[in-house]
Image (spheres, rainbow, N blue to C red):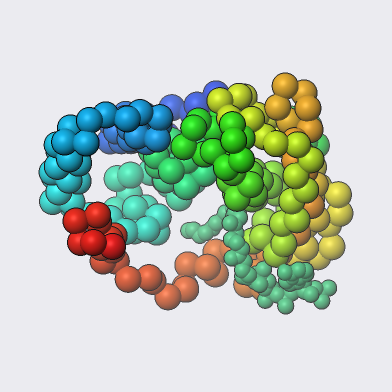
Amino acid sequence: MTELKNPFASEEITAPFNEEWQAKRRVAAAVRLLTEVLVTSSPDTSKMHDIAEQLENTASDFASSPRVYGRLDWIESGQHGSFGQVSHELNPLAGYSNPLAPPVTTRIEGDMAIGRCFCGWAYEGPPGSVHGGYVAAIFDQFMGFAQKLGKRPGMTGYLNVSYHHRTPLTTDLHLEARITKQEGRKTFMEGKMFAHDELTASCEALFIEPRKGMYALKQQARPEEVFSPPTARSGA
Ligand SMILES: CCCCCCCC/C=C\CCCCCCCC(=O)SCCNC(=O)CCNC(=O)[C@H](O)C(C)(C)COP(=O)(O)OP(=O)(O)OC[C@H]1O[C@@H](n2cnc3c(N)ncnc32)[C@H](O)[C@@H]1OP(=O)(O)O
């Protein structure tokens, strides 16, 4: 078992913890590809119904395997890696095994955090540009990681995003963040997003360490495990 103290701190993709995650990354990459072709293609309608049926069967196959809900449960058996490793896989913005994640890559260089991200057509907001909500989400993740530059990691209190120019799709986005001030449990930070060296967005963020620290979050109530998303078939 390899213990990665900081699995995010690599410019390149950090190796998966074991073969399970390696396989899951492959599935996630296929689902990302599927999402990209779904929003950029126009197959025959009956073909799409066939594809939907195949995908519904695939989802049922998955659902019949052992289920694990939430990162705390993932770490419990000791078979799937540490909390950091599981987060590295399942984080919704940076997790390689989570197809929702573009993903955002991050590393520390001196007193700065540096990040990278690439958003395909599924992220389109204004024509040809990344949706502003995703720009904010990318910042939230990246700034949350960049707190590593400080000593008291916490949760986002506020995240004020300024949109200077549209952020282009299918373009390598460069991210930078630094701490501007630390006051007790509060970490103030600023962040920037660049495309082709142009500043497209910036942010000011405050992260606040919970009174009992981040590990106290473990004690919070669990959400319901059962999740039944509405399907087109159910008319929702
Ligand atoms: C085995 C595993 C265990 C886990 C271990 C993990 C370790 C991992 C380490 C690192 C990972 C980093 C993870 C980054 C995550 C990514 C970012 C997110 O998505 S976070 C989700 C979005 N954010 C929320 O959901 C916050 C919801 N809000 C809260 O929970 C609370 O409001 C919280 C913790 C932010 C503050 O609660 P209080 O009870 O500590 O607040 P009070 O004591 O009243 O305030 C403290 C000071 O902060 C100011 N303050 C509080 N909220 C503020 C706000 N919104 N704006 C400005 N100031 C605020 C107050 O005025 C006060 O200031 P004065 O001490 O009086 O000077």
The quadrant in which residue 45 appears is: top left
Residue 207 at x, y = what percent? 71, 59
Q: Eyeballing the image, is 190 above or below 128? A: below
The residue lying toward the viewer, choosing from 185 and 104, is 104
Q: Quadrant of the N terminus?
A: top left
- Residue placed at 61% from the left, 40% from the top? 126
The quadrant in which residue 56 appears is: top left
Residue 92 at x, y = what percent? 47, 47
Residue 205 visible in the displayed image: no
- Is residue 171 rendered to the left or right of residue 74? right
The quadrant in which residue 108 appears is: top right
Q: Quadrant of the C terminus?
A: bottom left
Residue 73 at x, y = what percent? 34, 58
Quadrant holding ligand 1?
bottom right
The residue lying toward the viewer, choosing from 199 and 215, is 199
- Residue placed at 47% from the left, 67% from the top? 218
- Is residue 198 rendered to the left or right of residue 65? right
- Is residue 72 rendered to the left or right of residue 19? right
The residue lying toward the viewer, choosing from 70 and 139, is 139
Numbered marks: total: 0
